Amino acid sequence: MATEIEAFREETRAWLAEYCPPGARGPGPISNGSTKIVIEDADTRVWLERMVEKGWTVPTWPTAYGGGGLNKQEYLILLAEMRRIDARPALSGFGTSMIGPTLLELGSEDQQLRHLPRIARAEVEWCQGYSEPGSGSDLASLRTRADDAGDHFVINGQKVWTSGAHYADWMFCLVRTDFDAPKHEGISFVLLPMDQPGVTVKPIRLISGESPFNETFFDNAIARKEDLVGELNKGWTVGKRLLQHERSGMESLVSGSASGATGLAAEAKRCLGERDGRIKDPQYRASVLRHEMNNRVFRLAQRRAVEESDGGTPGPVTSIFKVYGSELQQEYYDLLTQMRGARGFGWDAATFSEAELETTRRWLYYRASSIYSGSNEIQRNIIAKRVLGLPD
């Protein structure tokens, strides 16, 4: 077995060396599969095509669904070899990280055959219809309704903070199908196409200047019965499992640090100076070192979780990844802006460089990382009850 694993490592290393273009290494664009986004960068496009053909856009998925069929050991080797050459993932989004793994576990065979290969081939991007006005952290109080109309549901209501809805082709959505049931019951999990009459998307402009979030309105929108995932009125179970996939952060095992960026030490040397190859300022030197060590520990914890769960997504322990990962993201941009001093909070394009402006936008954006996908306060409650077994 050891010989087979080493052979796989050698083959993987050779394949990546030959087929991963220079422009797909290091920071850069990553496809999310949306039919509404044109991939301008040639190397990014070629890398995606090659990884789709190899099945490595979703390495552990069965080959019948367009995946690579890799086992746990092979998957970890692929991750290590991609990191070794700083290769970016070819595909990343809600399809690969959230709805895809959920359908693999809980979807019907028909749903798997219809939806998973399209995700693997980067032919579709998904968005999430969970939060509503007045139903954020208390998601079970959602009011968007789906009425039975024979072979389909008719959906009316509103979702908010729907990330990427303006680029998405499909949505996975929690809807209320029984208003007389207790609030955690009577909820169903449905899939619906975004490009249909009755679905209206309105971007929300953030303080960072970006509009990644949207309001989504349903006015007699349609979800087919064959796209009901799990049982009618039992969607809360499906929805919770999907959130565990979202919070796991497993895709960062491929893409680099938890903060989503690298080179903090090099930037510190540039901004603060260096002496004997070290960051000159001892206080910042200690802060950068601590951040990098914590980031390494975080990645090792994620890797251990993969190893212990046969390559799948763990359960409630993913709340730990959500809390710690979001705090690492915030810490990274706090350090970066502080080290740049007056250049760390640029807003005027005539005065600041694009890199400085981007740092400011990201610093503002990641203020929300401890709120979205379930606030860190909620995650700590989950950790206390479901991981540590503490009493209510």
Image (cartoon, helix red, strand yellow):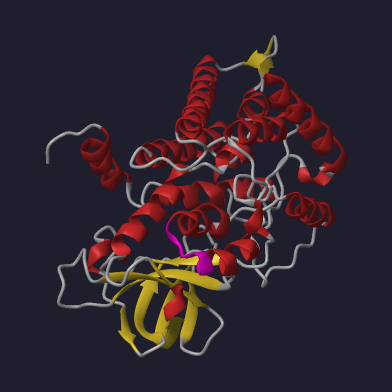
Question: Which residue is at the far top?
Answer: 276
Question: Which residue is at the far left?
Answer: 392
Quadrant where the N terminus sits is: top right
Point out residue 386 in the picture as x, y percentages from the top left corner: 25, 39
Q: Is residue 211 visible?
A: no
> Residue at left 73%, top 39%?
87
Point out residue 221 in the picture as x, y percentages from the top left corner: 43, 86
Magenta residues, as a range?
Answer: 106-111
Residue 110 is covered by the magenta coloring: yes
The main secondary structure of the magenta stretch is helix
Residue 263 is covered by the magenta coloring: no
Point out residue 125 in the picture as x, y percentages from the top left corner: 59, 66
Q: Looking at the image, which is closer to me, 53 or 339? A: 53
Quadrant where the C terminus sits is: top left
> Residue at left 47%, top 83%?
199
Residue 366, above or below 134: above
Residue 99, above or below 37: above
Q: Looking at the image, which is closer to me, 197 or 15? A: 15
Q: Looking at the image, which is closer to me, 377 or 9? A: 9
> Residue at left 74%, top 28%?
9
Q: How many marks?
A: 0
Would you say 160 lies left or right of 87 here?
left
Residue 267 position by quadrant: top right
Q: Is residue 348 visible?
A: yes
Would you say 111 lies left or right of 177 here?
right
Residue 261, above or below 204: above
> Residue at left 45%, top 81%?
224
Point out residue 247 in the picture as x, y percentages from the top left corner: 42, 46
